[in-house]
Amino acid sequence: MINKDFHVNNRRRLAESIGGGLIVLSAYGRMQRGNDASFGFEQESNFWWLTGIDAPEWWVIIDSGRDKSWLVSPDISDIHQTFDGSLSADQASKISGIESVISRDEANKLLRELAQKHSVVYSLGDSPHAQYYDFSINPAPKKMWRNLETIFNDVQDCRLEIAKLRAIKQPVEIAAIKKAIHLTVDAFKDVKEKLPNLKYEYEVEAEFTYAFRKKGAAGHAYDPIVASGLSACTLHYCENNKKLQANKILLMDIGARVDGYSADISRSYIIGQASIRQSQVHSAVEAAHHQIIKLLKPGLSFIEYYAAVDTIMKSALVELGLISLADNEDKYRRYFPHAIGHGLGVDVHDSLGQFSEFIPGMVVTVEPGIYIPEEAIGIRIEDDILITDKSNINLSASLPTTL
């Protein structure tokens, strides 16, 4: 069970990984939704992993040398307290296992005192993939970094150290992921039975949302993808507002979030009667999917794995008459344009910590897909895989991959 002991242990492990020292992190702040309203809050995953705090604007200060931590509460006006409420000091302490909860003013004074003993402070630097984002980044971690630069001689990034720890899941984390997967699998099975009576993509989405919330999950781990026909060829399609098309394939990429951890499962189902071509493409993806899962084992290098995946996927595309063996990478990627998978955990796209091979305790997705816009066919099959000491376990294997 995810409790304060989990977060206490995570702080201890991080302190050991950086060889002691001082660590200061900020939670995310709220982001504007429209005019004077904010979006529903979602926490920075590293901050949550270390503290369990799921509220905005908090800080954590970890002095490894003294084996002492502080939580820093945000300054909240009476008006915002009335409208939005806030996490109390007692609640924050019980969740995190940190006894000392101090104010912003007390924290800034403490940081100046700690700067007399620590020339280096660790915090979260920029995401290594930020250049590829097409959205604004939550400014709170950068604001913290700049604040620390005014106090300490040297601010260093501990993002990679945390990522390495988070990449290898602890038993309690695997249990939470299994719960999220189990709930998601049940919802998929229920929705598949109801599909003949559903008319719109949003009705499908609503069935999943109801199933997740009814069982007490936080909801969706990410914006659900419910894509009928040609829409499935837009990889992150999430409008989910079109009518379900007869005799077209419906691609669903959906996962619940339970106890802070995510599931991520994709299935492609036919609405009505499948054509020979649709069946051929689905069978090709399904066969590749199971072949690729069999590859996964500890010690397999990522480079070897990706090369083997490319061989399998290119062979599938050749058999479907979409490419020839002589075609270049661009033509191959026209029909399989995304990665074969990613880490899974607190973040639905969890970092694998820059390791070079699969390690027991990693949880990864396998999600081959073939997308043929000119034929309005988009098919993806995705399962969540635990790397074990000798091989792997498909955690979502109880959900059939059939069309």
Image: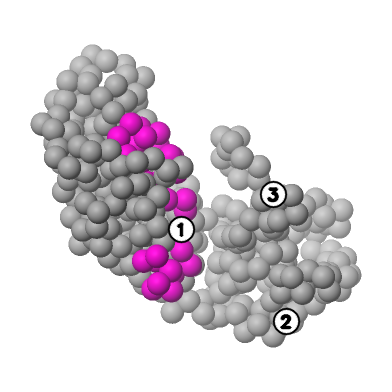
| Residue sitting nearer the eye, 379 or 316 | 379
When the figure is inspected, residue 17 is found, relative to residue 196, above or below; the finding is below
Of residues 223 and 230, the one nearer the viewer is 230
Q: Of tags 3 and 1, which is closer to the observer?
A: 3
Q: Quadrant of the C terminus?
A: top left
Crowding at mark 1 (Cα within 10 Å: few <14, some 14-19, many 20+): many
> Could you give the CA–CA distance between mark 2 and mark 3, rounded to whole angstroms?
30 Å
What residue is disc 2 on?
Answer: 89
Q: Residue 34 — which label?
A: 3
The quadrant in which residue 232 appears is top left
Image side of residue 129 versus residue 187, left or right:
right
**What residue is pinned by disc 1?**
221
Of 170 and 288, which appears nearest the observer?
288
Which quarter of the image is occupied by the N terminus? bottom left
Residue displayed at 46% across by 71% down = 259
Range of the magenta residues? 210-238
Q: Measured from the top left, where is residue 55 in percent x and y? A: 65, 68
Q: Residue at left 74%, top 70%?
A: 83
How far apart, in angstroms, are the residues tagged by discs 2 and 1?
A: 28 Å
Residue 321 image position (x, y, % from top left): 17, 20
Judge whether residue 77 is colored magenta: no
Residue positioned 36% across, 46% down in the render = 201
> Would residue 389 be seen by someone viewing this image from the given angle?
no
Q: Is residue 397 above or below residue 280?
A: below
Q: Nearer the viewer, mark 2 or mark 3?
A: 3
Q: How many marks?
A: 3
Label 2 sits on what residue type? Ala
The Cα–Cα distance between marks 3 and 1, rounded to whole angstroms, is 22 Å
